[in-house]
Image (cartoon, helix red, strand yellow):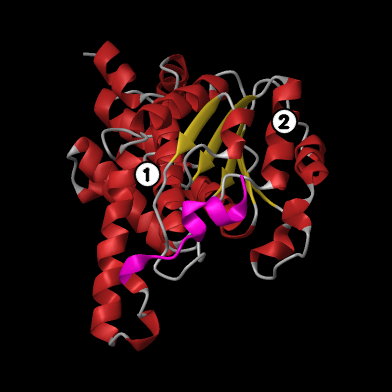
Amino acid sequence: MDIASLTTEARNTKTMNLDSMSIHEFATVMNQEDQSVATSVSLALRDIESAIATIIEHFNQGGRLFYMGAGTSGRLGVLDAAECVPTFGIDPKMVQGLIAGGIKAMTIAVEGAEDNIQLGAEDLKARGLNSNDTVVGIAASGRTPYVIGGLDYATQVGAATVSLACNGHAAISAHANISIEVPVGPEVLSGSTRLKAGTAQKLVLNMLSTGAMVGIGKVYENLMVDVKPTNEKLIERAKRIIREATHCNEEVADTNFEASGHDVKLAIVMILTGLSKQNASVQLRKAGGFISRLVKNND
């Protein structure tokens, strides 16, 4: 597909006079355009649901999740992967973000990297991609060679593949098991896909990672029970989560937080079941990490 035919490259008729708008007019039209993004995402929910289910299935097989993209798309993947570590207490290798040109491309454009179809395969090969893994290729245009190369290599090794594009009938859709297309239309600033397209991608990535983590027991009710309390703020949050999950007082939360070795999930199970740290840990493993299953079985 020629780049001129992409809706993300088209001129937005609502902002043809962008350079002469007042700040109020600019902010108003940009806000109005942004509001349309969530609606566009809602039209892709069925494919998003399929992607989440696939990621969960592969996590349960010991697999990993890889995001890959170039420019803004790659940066958003790296961001989401990085945020999964403190939020869900996972090993950094479990969710990884790959950006064309490597980590230096997070701040400085690496010329030609996104056009290298071999580079996507090489980056995945270097991380030992296997059939238990899932690869999500992200491209606002839906045609980035780096992403296509990565998806094709993932297919070769039998990994699950998901594509995420912000144009309809995207080229990368033909290279993935599951294709998510979220056409957001022309940007307020023509061709600047860090705007609506970037927002759409962030919304979808939020759903993929959060939904998958919920699906493997990283959440109890709507609480981040696997959060790693690595600083003062997170320690206070951890204790608050324990209190909210168990309806206990501050003293009980503090005592069990310490007794559990600062393991929020374990502390919650200890309080809810009255089990010792060791027995709570055993029961939690038997429940697959799901507090709700453990508590139900102990009722």
Q: Quadrant of residue 120?
A: top right
Asked if residue 163 lies left or right of residue 292, the reply is right
Q: Residues within 10 Å of mark 2 (few under 14, many from 20)?
A: many
Compare residues 171 and 233 and report the one nearer the observer.
171
Instruction: Decide if residue 101 is in sight here.
Output: no
Question: Is 2 inside the magenta-drawn segment?
Answer: yes
Q: Position of residue 251 (x, y in %)?
A: 24, 48
Question: Is 47 inside the magenta-drawn segment?
Answer: no
Q: Position of residue 1 (x, y in %)?
A: 61, 44
Residue at x-position 34% and y-position 67%: 13
Asked if residue 97 lies left or right of residue 293, the reply is right
Label number found at residue 257: 1
- Going from N to C along the chain, the mark reached first, 2 or 1, is 2
Residue at x-position 45% and y-position 14%: 286
Q: In the picture shown, does residue 44 fall above or below 215?
A: below
Q: In the picture shown, does residue 139 fall above or below 61?
A: below
Disc 2 to disc 1, how far (Cα)? 46 Å
Secondary structure at numbered mark 1: helix
Magenta region: which residues? 1-14
Residue at x-position 60% and y-position 54%: 3
Q: Amino acid at mark 2?
A: Asp
Q: Give the label, 2 or 1, closer to the camera.
A: 2
Numbered disc total: 2
Q: Amino acid at mark 1?
A: Phe
Q: Position of residue 164 (x, y in %)?
A: 52, 40
Residue indicated by mark 2? 152
Compare residues 78 and 267 and report the one nearer the observer.
78
